[in-house]
Image: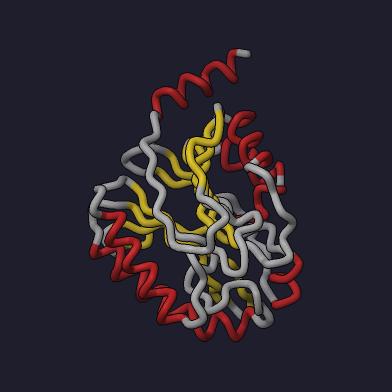
Amino acid sequence: MRVRTSLSENLKAAKQSIFKAALLRPAFIALPEYFSVPNNMEHFDSAKEISRETFAPTLSFLTQISSDVPDTYLMGGTMLEEDNGKFYNVSTLWRKGELLGKYRKRNPIKAEIAAGVTPGDKPMVLHTKFCKVGMLVCADMFSPQAIKEVVKLGAELVFLPVAALGTHPAVSGHPLTFRLAAENGVYIVKIGNVSSNARGGRSAFITPWGIEQEVSDAVEDIILTKDFDMEKLREYRRQIVSN
């Protein structure tokens, strides 16, 4: 998703893409990290100010839009939630207007910490009618513990909303997420939010046997779709255990 300069523009763009994707009757639709935040992380200074500007409208948007696509699970990107004076980068899963669960990013980056984001401390895996869904956010993939915990809880499909600063080093392919998928036997859905460039923020479908799809470096809205074979994945996992 291309980052806009205002909350209303971001929500409008997300709505248009969700309705467009819903025409394909998918099991899941997923949004990027901080999808509603104006300018995303290019000017990330105060978690308090960002939360108070964007949280309530984003929560209302996700409640309504998930009601509008009732046959689809919606992974609502992330938003900054305040709890007892602390601010968390929260990823959510919705269906039919109901919040099924939320996950607090456990490994915020330096820019987030400087802005006042507090790390979460618990893994999250949710049962859906299709598979077990694990929730991670961006830099969580650098934590072996965070990954092992969602896998231990049975995650088969892992949502990884990400955002890229303009200072992010250029990355060829998806070497880290591919290794995680192969070693742990999971499908990873990486959902990127980009502004000045797509460094590290490219959306992709990552499986234990390769990168199935990825977007280009173009800064534009793109919808990726993929049919995942869950039985193939479960057989792969059984082989990992037996070996």
- Residue shown at 65% from the left, 74% from the top: 42
Query: Height in image: 142 above or below 49?
Result: above
> Which one is nearer the viewer's eye here, 118 or 39?
39
Instruction: Tell me the quarter of the image containing the C terminus.
Output: top right
- Which residue lies at the image location 46% right of the left edge and 26% below the top edge? 233
Image coords of residue 40 (percent x, y): 57, 73
**To which quarter of the image does residue 192 belong?**
bottom right
Q: Is 229 drawn above or below residue 141 in the view shown?
A: above
The x and y percentages for residue 217 are 57, 55
Colour scheme shown: secondary structure
The single residue placed furthest to the top in the displayed view is 242
Answer with left or right where residue 94 lies relative to residue 111. Answer: left
Closer to us: 120 or 113 = 113
- Give the number of callouts: 0
Mark yes or no: residue 135 visible: no
Instruction: Identify which residue is drawn at 47% across, 63% down.
Output: 220
Front one among 232 and 100: 232
Instruction: Locate residue 29 relative to residue 193 in the image: left or right.
Output: left
143 w.r.t. 169: above or below = above
Q: Left of 207 or right of it: where is 165?
A: right
Which of the 4 image quadrants contains residue 201?
A: bottom right
Residue 47 visible, this angle? yes
Q: Residue at x 60, y 29 (%)?
A: 182
Q: Position of residue 207 (x, y in %)?
A: 52, 33
